[in-house]
Image (tube, helix red, strand yellow):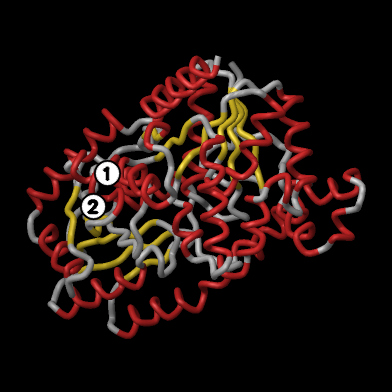
Amino acid sequence: MRVVYLAAGAAGMYCGSCIRDNRLAATLLRQGRDIKLVPLYTPVRTDETDVSEHEVFYGGINVYLEQHSALFRALPRALSSLLDLPGLLNAVGTRAARIDPAEVGGLTVSVLQGPDGPQARELKHLIHGLKRMQVGLLNLPNLMFIGIAGALRAALNVPILCTLGGEDVFLDRLPQPYRQQAFDLIRSQADHADGYVALSGYYAGHCREHFHLPADKLRTVPLGMALDAEVRETEPPAPPETIAFVGRVCADKGFDRVVDALITLKKRGRDVRLLVAGYRGAGEEDFVNEQIGRLKQNHCPHEDRGEVSRADKFALLRAAHVFTMPSTFPEAKGMTILEAMSQGVPVVQPATGSFVETIEATGGGLLYDPDQPDALADALESLLDDPQRRRELGQAGRTAVARDYTDEVMADRMWQIYEDAATRFR
């Protein structure tokens, strides 16, 4: 059985979904499974070896122009296909990454309209490409593509699954009437998928309620990571006590909350520094500069390493006593949490979303109430004051990741779901 996994590129940004999808495909290929990772919108970007196909479908430039120009929609596909070249899509990707959800409400709804929307030509091209690939099972990347499931199923006669990976954050921010239209389209098309795969138990339950997805079609496959990085054997020496933040450096991921906590700890007389790494979009530069300025004004030691390679990311984590990424919304997944735990670094996270089940399942960190003032600073300080507890939590997290959250475990669970869906379809 050939599985084709459609992965929505994130316009040149490191994206947790792209990293997870690429790792899943890479591991299945290593296991001898027949799978193709096919990009949508833009090429995927990952900090590991990219195993995706070269050809991009639903190219972001074409999708955008088709939305805004009936004349462009009439152009021959041979001409418009030139805009799907990966190099060109990457070149313009940084602009797309800065677009706020409020600006693309109409486009989101149009894609969900599938064969009835302005991007019908892209759907036809995708169907042609999938037939050429001889797909046996299709995996959609998220609910924003559920509107094409019915047409794909009719054209290909194969089972169709859909990954659930955090699309609620984007969809909930759409302005009206687009938000309601998008939700209505998702709910009306939900039965066209043979199954849904959430990346956490929390998100499976949330999507069942939030999008009215059929409960009998929901499955959960937690994240998995390759354990190929060097692992630290002992804690870094102190002082200074070191807190790490690795992820998209923005307000949504709570970077300002980390800065608040560090300033609080500094005022309490602690010798503490902050290590920061991660992608930041052009539209977030002012926010990031403001937060770095606050650290400087309060004489808080810090290092901002910007975007880093996979190896440098793990080296940064090994240099930390504690990790935190206090997202301001309930996360559907949280790969960086597992990466920190894999290095024996305890984590401190808000008691929201998937963080709760991950920390409860691994024992690799602490949860705090994000609604309580100074709760993050207090939780960080409690671990900085207790080296023995840090070691115990770090070891528990490291053991649990190696046992339950590897790429092999993730790939095995996912392939079983694929086989079950194919059996039921026959």
Q: Secondary structure at mark 2?
A: strand
Q: Which residue is mark 2?
A: 347
Q: Which mark is residue 251?
A: none
Q: Which mark is residue 341?
A: 1
Residue, x 66% and y 44% (percent of image)? 40
Q: Position of residue 215 (x, y in %)?
A: 37, 37
Q: From the viewer's side, name the closer residue of 294 and 174.
A: 174
Label 1 crowding class (10 Å Cα cut-off): few <14, some 14-19, many 20+? many
Report how far apart the C-alphas of labels 2 and 1 lie in the structure: 7 Å
Q: Position of residue 207 (x, y in %)?
A: 40, 47
Q: From the viewer's side, name the closer residue of 353 and 400.
A: 353
Q: From the viewer's side, name the closer residue of 10 and 78.
A: 78
How many numbered marks appear? 2
- Which image quadrant: the N terminus? top right
Residues at badges 2 and 1 in contact (C-beta under 8 Å)? Answer: yes
Amino acid on which the number 1 mark rests in the picture: Met
Q: Height in image: 418 above or below 274? A: above
Q: Position of residue 53 (x, y in %)?
A: 67, 34
Horizontal side of 317 relative to 414 (left or right) equals left
Taking the image as drawn, is residue 334 in sight?
no
Horizontal side of 155 relative to 149 (left or right) equals right
Residue, x 58% and y 64% (percent of image)? 178
Q: Position of residue 422 (x, y in %)?
A: 52, 18
- Which image quadrant: the C terminus? top right
Horizontal side of 194 relative to 324 (left or right) equals right
Taking the image as drawn, is residue 202 in sight?
yes
Residue, x 30% and y 71% (percent of image)? 257
Q: Secondary structure at mark 1?
A: helix
